[in-house]
Amino acid sequence: AIDCNSHQPEPHNMQNTMNRRPHGLCYGASPAPLTRVVEHTRARKTQVIRAQQSQAEKETVKEIVKAPSSAPQPKPPHQREPQTPRPVRAIWKVALDQVLDSAIDVGRHIGRQVAPLPLRDFNDEVSEGTTGTKLRLAKLAKPRVVVLGSGWGAHSLIKVVDTDAFDIILVSPRNHFVFTPMLPSTAVGTVEFRSLLEPIRQANPFVQYLQATCDSIDAERKTISCTAASQTQEGLFPQFEVPYDVLVMAVGEKPATFGVKGVQEHCFFMKEVTDTVNLRKRIGQCFELAALPGTSKAEREQLLSFVVVGGGPTGVEFAGTLSDFLRIDLKQKFPELIKYVSVTLVQSAQAILPQFDSNLATRAMETLRMEGVIVRTGLRVVEVKQDEVVLKDGDVIKYGVCVWSTGNSTNPLVQALVSAFPEQDEWNAGKPSTTRKLFVDPFLRVVGARDVIALGDCCAVSGLPLPATAQVAGQQGSYIAHLLNKGCDVGLGGDSEPSPSHPLVKGPFGLPLPLLLQGADAGSLASMDGGGRAYFNKPFEFLSLGIMAYVGADQAVTQIDPVNLKVSGGLAFLLWRSVYITKQVSLRNRVLILFDWVKARLFGRDTSLF
């Protein structure tokens, strides 16, 4: 059975720079012979089951993602060489590498401030597509990198990538980046929505942005097909094709319902700004409805019952923030209704915040209960009806607002790409389609695909288990930008494939320069070969900075991994705010959020409905 209440969604996972579960660089050991036999047996059973799939279902997958006909066939599991664990470098060495990379990034960013803005009209670059109905963008002299998504990974990449060397096109239906860790604060008015956003065109004006959705990927022709996110006055959605030299998949995941009936129809999620806008509006509506004459006591108790499903960082932070909003602001405006208010946090595991140290998790639960939040652990939701949550033990909780914050699931585009490549299908054998990820090698190249990279929640790294958090996605985006900036060809993804490389830089008399002079980062180049190439030998390494969560009443829990620091209470709250303000992506965002905090403290949170 899938534990549908013990995982956290992307808001504090894709996104949460500090609300990320810490992970060291641990690697899987080589399987024992008996384990290999069991895995091979399972794989064979899976092949038999898949062989029984209908031909129509297979054709649907082919339409979404077309893999190259010459794609290499993977070895069966029992013939695969065991993974060699990668050596774990000291934290200070990884941190030093990131500091040096950041120094180069600062110089590039300063250069953009004085460079003239590009003047580019895509109408000058279009031609008729392969279908005769779609327009196709022409390729330029510079290599084209197409980025799908506008989350943490994509945003980090476009901030760092060298736009002088590459033609960067970002495709996403959302034209802005969201600092998702603070979405719970926007749902109650502590911070305004636009304070968390940075438009893509402002993040890097030298990156070309197209507001559209990627419908399909043709890996053989290295082309994606897109449909505009907005319609014309005639009700049409323009379609077009974009060829690429390198494709970056940074599409993240969608909220998971785990098949629980009624979640999609009746619950609020906390994934996008639109989710918290609607949630904030509904909270105000519940109080206004309860204040109307003729509303019975039972109706008031139902309207003012707020249920949060999921005890991870997102659910806990929203429960604590909502408790503050009710206790401080709405108590003053609706004093006659406050006795009917209840906040219930439902968690299927026996403890909340499973990513944290057990002592910190216990203190977080004690703080929530002291602030009036009803914390119910060890309970699983089996159905959500229009006005009640049904638990597995048969108990029912009436609600006016239900927030679902339990985990993520794979989006259809990733599912199709996984099914299109035999290597991907093998590594995801036995997994439900909603939990499959793109399997990538240590250089984040999609295994079995050529010139395709995956970042963030939508991928799983070979030999390196990682949490689905914003910290990971952000660091992966920077890593890929630096790899591309060194001029490396991505090539075919796979553990046994050559690492990314670039042609040797020639010196006097046409002789190759020494290895130390072959790249900006000498330590990342391992060797040169007789074929005239220098190979990149710096696999992705995750530097966990720690995790933190706000629990209400100006209290927080903070766990900083590099120094093994575990703090709770008021000091942790100050650290929480300090980190969140310094991790904002621009000076504009820092100023806006500081003003929002001061405004909420002096004048209270706004309760207007519009």
Image (cartoon, grey):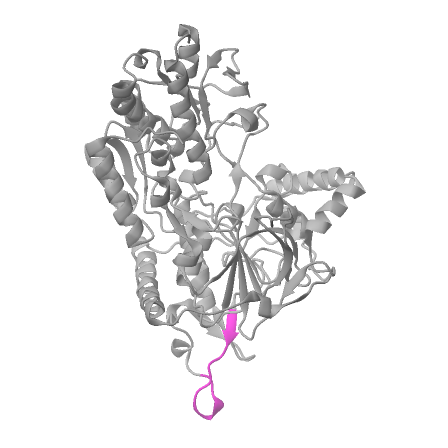
Q: Confirm whether residue 535 shows in the render.
A: yes
Task: Give coordinates of residue 514: x percent, y percent.
Answer: 41, 81
Q: Is residue 544 left or right of residue 33?
A: left
Q: Does 41 appear above or below 512? A: above
Residue drawn at the location 72% of the way across and 58% of the way down: 133
Relative to 253, residue 223 above or below: below
**Image side of residue 99 versus residue 211, left or right:** left
Pick the front one: 422 or 302 = 302
For residue 68, above or below residue 555: below
User: What is the x, y in percent for residue 526?
Assistant: 45, 70
Please state the horizontal and vertical placement of residue 113, each as a whole percent of the image: 33, 67
User: Is residue 113 positioned above or below 443 on the image?
Assistant: below
| Span shown in magenta | 501-512
Q: Residue at x 53, y 11 (%)?
A: 394
Q: Residue furthest front?
A: 233
Residue 503 within the segment the image draws in magenta: yes
**Count of picture labels:** 0
- Residue at the spot x=65%, y=47% of the render? 416
- Residue drawn 51% across and 70% down? 501
Whole-percent x, y for residue 330 in the image? 29, 22
Q: Give yes or no for residue 331 being in the magenta stretch.
A: no
Quarter of the rendering occupied by the N terminus: top right
In depth, the one of 581 and 85 nearer the eye is 581
Q: Nearer the viewer, residue 428 or 186?
A: 186
Q: Residue furthest bottom?
A: 509
Residue 19: which quarter of the image? top left
- Quadrant of the image occupied by residue 108: bottom left
Is residue 541 something that shows in the picture?
A: no
Q: Is residue 417 left or right of residue 28?
A: right
Q: Quadrant of the C terminus?
A: top left
